[in-house]
Amino acid sequence: MAGGLNRRYSAAKVLPFIAEYNVDVDEFAKSAFAYKTFNDFFYRRLKPAARPIAPGDDVAVLRPTDATSSSRMSTRRTGSM
């Protein structure tokens, strides 16, 4: 799927990708139909409240992707990362 994803015809891959991977379209800043290429969709903006970061002193690991983790990471609170 790598070739041509910055060309207009690649926009036809957006909706099938959303359906196959169950992407939450309610998080999108614009309509799923508005993306001109697959890369345009891949680098999409989300609504400001779509993915809040843990408030206060909560510890959080941030992953700026639509991925899932396949391993567990053991952490301990040390006051720094």
Image (cartoon, rainbow, N blue to C red):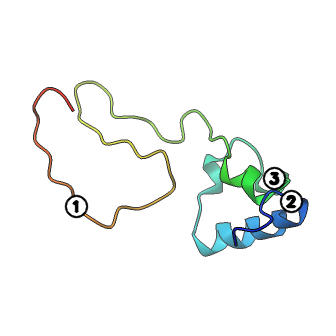
**In the rendering, which numbered label is found on residue 34?**
none
- Is 41 in front, or is 3? 3
> In the rendered image, which quarter contains the C terminus?
top left
**What is the distance, in whole Å, between disc 3 and disc 2 at their CAs?**
11 Å
Q: How many marks?
A: 3
Mark 1 Cα-neighbour bin, 10 Å: few <14, some 14–19, many ≥20: few
**Residue 6 at what x, y percent from top left?**
80, 56
Dot 1: element: loop
Please tell me whether mark 1 or mark 2 is closer to you in this view.
Answer: 2
Q: Residue at x 14, y 46 (%)?
A: 75
**What is the distance, in whole Å, between disc 1 and disc 2 at their CAs?**
37 Å
N-terminal of the pair, mark 3 or mark 2, is 2
Dot 3: element: loop
**Residue 19 at what x, y percent from top left?**
65, 72
Task: Say whether residue 81 is left or right of residue 76.
Answer: right
Q: Amino acid at mark 1?
A: Arg
Q: Quadrant of residue 11?
A: bottom right
N-terminal of the pair, mark 1 or mark 3, is 3
Task: Say whether residue 28 is left or right of residue 72.
Answer: right
Q: Residue at x 58, y 68 (%)?
A: 22
Whether residues under marks 1 and 2 lie with C-beta atoms below 8 angstroms apart, the answer is no
Q: Name the residue that disc number 2 marks.
A: 7
**In the rendering, which numbered label is found on residue 35?**
3
Q: Amino acid at mark 2?
A: Arg
- Is 13 in front, or is 48? 13
Q: Residue at x 72, y 73 (%)?
A: 16
**Residue 24 at what x, y percent from top left?**
59, 57
Q: Name the residue that disc number 1 marks.
A: 72
Mark 2 Cα-neighbour bin, 10 Å: few <14, some 14–19, many ≥20: few
Q: Amino acid at mark 3?
A: Tyr
Name, please, the residue furthest toward the right.
8
Q: Quadrant of residue 7?
A: bottom right
